Structure formats: structure tokens, C-alpha cells
Image (cartoon, helix red, strand yellow):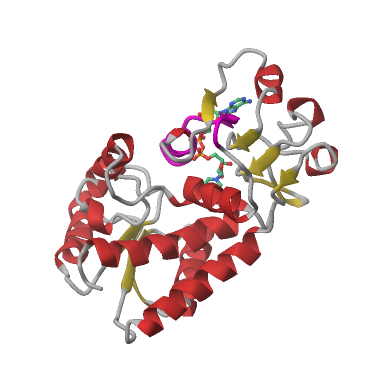
Amino acid sequence: MDGKRLRDEIVAGIRAEIRQLGDPSITLATVLVGADKPSQIYVRNKHRKAEESGMVSRHVELAADSSQDEVEEAVRDLVNDSAVHGILVQLPLPEGLDAERVLDLIPPEKDVDGLTERSMGRLVRGRPGLVPCTPLGVMRLLDRYGVSTSGKRAVVIGRSTLVGLPQVLLLGRKGVDATPTLAHSRTTDLAAQCREADILVAAAGMAGLVTADFVKPGAAVFDVGISRTEGGIVGDVDFDGVESIAGAITPMPGGTGPMTIGCLMENTLTAAKLLGAI
Ligand code: NAD
């Protein structure tokens, strides 16, 4: 399952939709505190894709030693700016800053990361809103590659609010209708649990955790975990060992990573719609 290709399709689709609407100015704003290198690269990629999608991007960069009040004020300015449709605060924040208090300021309509308490509440309650980009990307891949979900068993490894937990909620939603299990570091006999899965999503951040004996023949396997090693980026899935058993599999890199950015663009367009801007 080619995440780069589907991301490009999503970006092209958004660009076409915006053009058809007469090129309204849809703005994604990012906030970066400190000079963490990987975060800078992530933010730069997001801006590049926003521009390719026909959207406007705005960037607010604050010094690593900014106070909680300074960060909150920067976010509040974006919340109050009607020209801004999506707000993304790049996490993690430097030590000493309370990310929860910063996220709490973002209204659900502008919460393109889908990470705030109110966005999560909407997801749980099945109300329209924005959902986290990485699990949404997995849902888009399932759909694009024709993986059937109704009545299927799914196992998600990892229970974070960023990936695992919303993934389980999305897979179990009415209309998707899979039966998901949430596995984590205390799950006993993880391999046996995973072997039951028609859909397996690995989001533990443990290089090579999912080996051939975790995979049911024909299963769709999604690799979300990212570990940086000397040899480059490595996923949670032992791709070479699993590829011949799985019915479908995402590469790492080139699978769920690009889809995360593609879905951020989709969420920004959705935000503009939720705000009534288009
Ligand atoms: P996290 O550290 O918050 O959560 C990891 C989860 O995995 C925990 O719930 C833990 O219980 C579980 N876990 C850890 N080791 C395990 C093991 N041996 N067996 C079973 N469960 C285990 O991380 P996160 O924010 O959810 O991110 C998970 C991974 O996904 C990280 O590697 C992160 O870099 C990556 N990530 C990738 C993308 C993407 O676009 N592909 C996006 C976000 C995060």
C-alpha cells in the first residue's frame, strides 16, 4: 500500500477542489517552540504540502525558553484570527511547558491534529469533527486499497491518544464495523493476539517488533512505528519477513508517514468547512 502515491492523490484532489471554489485563501498555521531538528523538518514538510494543496501556510516560531504565557498568547492570536482555519502546535514542547494547557486553547473546528480533549470527545461521541491524522491515514489506505473491514478482526499495537486509541475508535465505528483489540506493552502473548487479526496496525515504536509469526496469512499490515537507527528509519514491522505472508502491507518509509501529512491537508480543508469559510 503506497502511502506516497495516495498522499499525492489527496493533495491533487484538494488542490482541484480549492480551485473549483475560486481559490479561497485557506490557511494552516503551525507553531514551533524551540529548534528541535526533526520538528523543524516535519513543519517544513507540512508547509510544502499545504502550498502544493493550494493552501496558505503561516508559521510562528518561538524561542525554546519561551514562557507558558508567551506560547499561549501566540496560540490565542491564531484562535482569534478568522483568516486562520487550522492550527497545529508541533509536539513535543520543550520541557517545562504544559502542552495540555496549550492544546486546550484550540477550538475543535481549528484542531487539525485532532488531539484536543474536545476533538477526542467528538470522536468518541460520533459527532462531526477532526480526527488525528495518522490513524485517519490508515483508514484512507484501507479504503483506497479495497481492504474490507466489516466484520473483520483488527489488532492495534499501542494505546497512545496520538495513534493507537483513536485508531481503535475509527476501526470500530459504525460503517467501518471492524472488531478491534487494543494491544499494548502489558498484553500477554502479543504474537497470538496479532495472528487473529485481519487488519494489524503496529504503533509501538519498537523496531522490528512484528515478525512473520505475528501475521495471519492474507492480513493487511500497517506499520506506523518509527525508530531511527544508524541504518536509517526502521518501522515496527519486519517488512522482509512479513511481506510474503501479508495480503497487503505498507512500506517504511513511504507508507503511513506521507499519509499523515496528506490527512493533515484533508483536515485543514475540513476545518475551513466546519468554520463555514467555504
Ligand atoms: P507512544 O510511546 O506514546 O506509545 C507507544 C505505545 O506502544 C504504548 O501504548 C505502549 O504500550 C505500546 N508499546 C510499546 N512497546 C510495546 C511492545 N513491546 N509491545 C506492545 N506494545 C508496546 O508512541 P506514539 O506517539 O503512539 O507513537 C508510536 C510510534 O509511531 C512511534 O514510533 C512514533 O514515532 C510513530 N509515529 C509515526 C507516525 C507516522 O506518521 N507514521 C505518526 C505518529 C507517530
Q: Residue 176 location in percent, x, y? A: 48, 40
Q: In this view, does 70 lie above or below 50?
A: above
Q: Is residue 89 above or below residue 20?
A: above
216 left or right, relative to 139:
right
Q: Is residue 98 above or below residue 65?
A: above
64 left or right, relative to 164:
left
Foreground of the two, 151 or 121: 151
Q: Quadrant of residue 212?
A: top right
Which stretch is magenta? 150-171
Q: Residue 53 location in percent, x, y? A: 46, 76
Q: Residue at x 57, y 64 (%)?
A: 7
71 left or right, relative to 231:
left
Q: Is residue 160 above or below residue 74?
A: above
Q: Residue furthest left?
A: 80
Q: Residue at x 22, y 43 (%)?
A: 101
Q: Can residue 22 be seen in this view?
A: yes
- Let me know if residue 59 is in the magenta part: no
User: Which quarter of the frame holds ligand 1?
Assistant: top right
Q: Which residue lies furthest to the top in this view?
A: 188
Q: In which quarter of the image is residue 213?
A: top right
Q: Which residue is drawn at 19% across and 50% down?
A: 105
Q: Residue at x 28, y 49 (%)?
A: 128
- Let me know if residue 167 is in the magenta part: yes
Which image quadrant: the C terminus?
bottom left
Foreground of the two, 24 or 17: 17
Q: Quadrant of residue 97?
A: top left
Q: Residue 235 location in percent, x, y? A: 68, 44
18 left or right, relative to 203:
left
Q: Residue 119 location in percent, x, y? A: 29, 45
Foreground of the two, 217 or 233: 217
